[in-house]
Image (cartoon, helix red, strand yellow):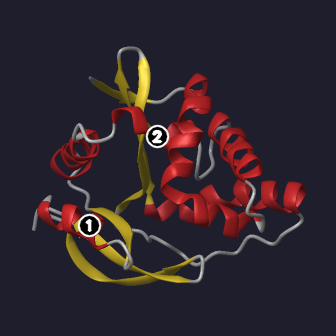
């Protein structure tokens, strides 16, 4: 297993894994409950640079030369700039105004989502990826990691707490209340 930065060529493998983790949110953003449209939305943006869902913000887990998992992580201070191309894409292709709530902020690197290929689930890949991110951002860069967890997903919250994340508040995303967790060296 190798964890590496994603490339534009990984976009078609990354997009379905991101969609696993955020299908309802993407449907809300594009205003359609259409898997094909949602997948196309993420694939297009994953291939491009300088946006919230760009390959530039992704780490991939490579297993036997295949993408087995992905983590989408970016500096919370850049959220608004990274969202501008997403808003333009949604406006152009879905004729919707894109104005979601702020899911992160300056002062943390934000784990937007983690997705693991169903063929590789149950092998601890998600946990290994989280440990890698903790090392990469908190230990090396001395920056907190933040993420949101759905209040209706206590098993995910339990995993994050077990890995050292702490609840720091709540946030609204796609009109749903989420718990904001952070991991830091304090």
The residue drawn where x is 50% and y is 42% is 17
Labelled disc at residue 186: none
The residue drawn where x is 19% and y is 45% is 131
Q: CA distance from mark 1 to mark 2?
A: 24 Å
Q: Is residue 94 left or right of residue 135?
A: right
Residue 94 position, x and y percent, is 86, 60
Quarter of the view holding residue 11: top right
The residue drawn where x is 77% and y is 68% is 31
Residue for badge 1? 155
Quarter of the view holding residue 65: top left
Q: Is residue 69 at all visible to an observer of this figure?
A: no
- Please tell me whether mark 1 sits on a helix, a strand or a loop: helix
Residue for badge 2? 58
Q: Is residue 56 left or right of residue 5?
A: right
Q: Nearer the viewer, residue 131 or 40?
A: 40
Task: State the quadrant of the C terminus.
Answer: bottom left
């Amino acid at each position: 297993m190798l964890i590496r930065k994603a490339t534009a060529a990984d976009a078609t493998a990354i997009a379905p894994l991101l969609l696993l983790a955020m299908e309802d949110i993407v449907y809300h953003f594009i205003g359609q409950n259409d898997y094909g449209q949602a997948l196309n939305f993420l694939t297009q943006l994953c291939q491009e640079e300088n946006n919230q869902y760009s390959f530039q913000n992704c780490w991939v887990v490579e297993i036997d030369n295949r993408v087995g998992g992905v983590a989408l992580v970016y500096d919370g201070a850049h959220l608004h700039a990274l969202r501008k191309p997403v808003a333009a894409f949604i406006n152009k292709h879905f004729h919707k105004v894109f104005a979601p709530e702020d899911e992160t902020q300056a002062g943390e690197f934000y784990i937007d989502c983690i997705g693991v290929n169903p063929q590789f689930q149950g092998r601890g890949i998600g946990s290994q990826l989280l440990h890698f991110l903790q090392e990469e951002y908190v230990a090396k860069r001395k920056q907190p990691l933040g993420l949101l967890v759905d209040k209706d997903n206590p098993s995910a919250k339990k995993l994050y707490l077990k890995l050292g994340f702490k609840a720091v508040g709540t946030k609204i995303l796609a009109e749903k209340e989420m718990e904001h967790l952070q991991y830091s060296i304090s």
